[in-house]
């Protein structure tokens, strides 16, 4: 396997549309990195540039330390798994798996041994004599994966390989990909718009939007320390709640900065006073994950921390948890709770949270501030 490095990669099309704007990052040998972002953000274009299916307008692509900009796809020693299975319909599973080896002139006995090895790895031994139309969607995707594996390339490139599968199959094949990566110690770059796939598969995530890289980090840090408003809103389901206001620094003790939301003032916690000192009067956006908001139980002892009062607008039970939508002032907040049986739409509720769970962003640049 080999490391991949991109330096200042740009892809611009006629008419001035820029699909990738100066992408720079590296993928270590045996690492699985996920390119995550909405449709049209440039992630698949970037993958195709690495594969050699697109030519960059500017920048350098290295695979195993070698510049590959001018190399044809077949000479880059990469294997790509596409969103569509792209199997040969008239060939059996065995023939599909061994086709690339046949083109390389590998002997029939070596080809058969390698195909059997990969089929066993993907639990396809009983399907080798079947045609693609006789397989389920999950089996077809495993054949597509196997066709890449059988080549033993330096790098595996996977372009939304699970998007055509139903939820149950996606979960199963996702698990198989993770298991394969651990077993093979392969270098993999995986493209998806599905944050669950990104969070569960990636050792690191490259978050993209509008052709630009927004953040590169581990899944946990992307979730807990989003670099800007886009990442904060895109990663997480339900999405992060946002409250926009103007920062007010308290001049007297206790020196706790507050965010004036218009309908109320929100304390941001004393520990943030020094880091926000230069932001006095600035427009900020405070973000809260749904799991960080909590209901104040009537009759319970008062809880420390800010309190927000509102009315319950929506109850969404999903089995082991319930999502509640509460209107507070002019905004709607979603919180994740254990199943709630006593609440009804229209009930007045009070919410609280720990101030250290607040994420703060500059309202104009979107960049994270104060932490």
Image (spheres, rainbow, N blue to C red):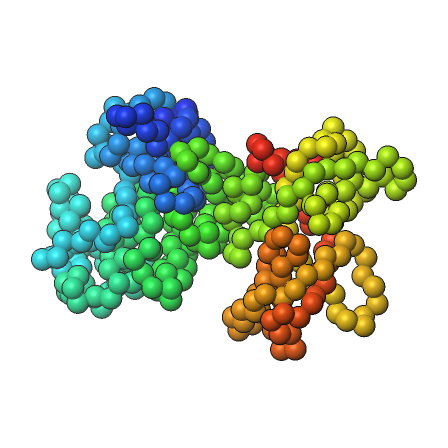
Determine if residue 50 is in view. Answer: no
Q: Position of residue 173 (x, y in %)?
A: 36, 60
Foreground of the two, 71 or 113: 71
Tell me the residue at 40%/28% (across/down): 21
Residue furthest out toward the top? 58
Q: Position of residue 212 (x, y in %)?
A: 44, 32
Q: Locate residue 22 relative to residue 11 in the image: left or right.
A: right
Q: Locate residue 294 relative to residue 61 in the image: left or right.
A: right
Q: Position of residue 180 (x, y in %)?
A: 38, 54
Tell me the residue at 22%/68% (across/down): 126
Determine if residue 322 is in view. Answer: yes
Kindly indicate the quadrant of the structure image that contains residue 25. top left
Q: Position of residue 105 (x, y in %)?
A: 12, 42
Residue furthest out toward the right? 253
- Image quarter in which the C terminus is found: top right
Q: Locate residue 19 relative to residue 224 in the image: left or right.
A: left
Tell me the residue at 34%/21% (across/down): 58
Kindly indicate the quadrant of the structure image that contains residue 344. bottom right
- Image quarter in which the N terminus is found: top left
Tell me the residue at 24%/66% (across/down): 136
Kindly indicate the quadrant of the structure image that contains residue 106. top left
Foreground of the two, 371 or 351: 351
Work out whether 136 lies above or below 357: below
Residue furthest out toward the bottom? 341
Foreground of the two, 151 or 106: 151
């Amino acid at each position: 396997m080999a490391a991949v490095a991109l330096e200042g990669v740009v892809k611009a099309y006629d008419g001035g549309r820029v699909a990738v704007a100066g992408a720079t990052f590296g993928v270590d040998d045996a690492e699985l990195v996920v390119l995550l972002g909405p449709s049209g953000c440039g992630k698949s274009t970037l993958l195709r540039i690495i594969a050699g299916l697109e030519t960059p307008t500017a920048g350098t692509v290295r695979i195993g330390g070698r510049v590959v900009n001018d190399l044809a796809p077949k000479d880059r020693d990469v294997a790509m798994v596409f969103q569509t299975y792209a199997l040969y319909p008239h060939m059996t599973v065995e023939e599909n798996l061994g086709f690339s080896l046949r083109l390389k002139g590998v002997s029939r006995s070596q080809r058969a041994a390698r195909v059997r090895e990969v089929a066993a790895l993907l639990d396809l031994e009983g399907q080798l004599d079947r045609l693609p139309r006789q397989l389920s969607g999950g089996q077809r995707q495993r054949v597509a994966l196997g066709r890449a594996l059988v080549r033993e390339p330096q790098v595996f490139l996977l372009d939304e390989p699970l998007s055509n599968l139903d939820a149950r199959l996606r979960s199963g094949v996702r698990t198989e990909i993770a298991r394969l990566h651990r077993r093979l110690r392969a270098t993999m770059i995986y493209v998806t718009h599905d944050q669950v796939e990104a969070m569960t598969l990636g050792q690191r995530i490259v978050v993209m939007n509008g052709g630009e890289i927004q953040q590169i980090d581990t899944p946990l840090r992307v979730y807990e320390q989003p670099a800007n408003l886009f990442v904060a809103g895109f990663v997480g389901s339900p999405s992060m709640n946002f409250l926009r206001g103007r920062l007010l620094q308290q001049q007297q003790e206790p020196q706790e900065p507050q965010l004036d939301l218009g309908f109320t003032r929100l304390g941001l916690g004393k520990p943030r006073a020094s880091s926000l000192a230069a932001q006095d009067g600035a427009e900020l956006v405070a973000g809260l994950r749904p799991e960080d908001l909590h209901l104040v139980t009537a009759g319970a002892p008062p809880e420390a921390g800010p309190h927000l009062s509102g009315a319950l607008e929506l109850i969404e039970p999903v089995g082991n948890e319930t999502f509640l939508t509460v209107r507070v002032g002019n905004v709607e907040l979603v919180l994740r709770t254990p199943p709630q049986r006593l609440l009804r739409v229209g009930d007045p509720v009070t919410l609280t949270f720990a101030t250290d769970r607040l994420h703060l962003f500059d309202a104009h640049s979107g960049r994270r501030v104060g932490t």
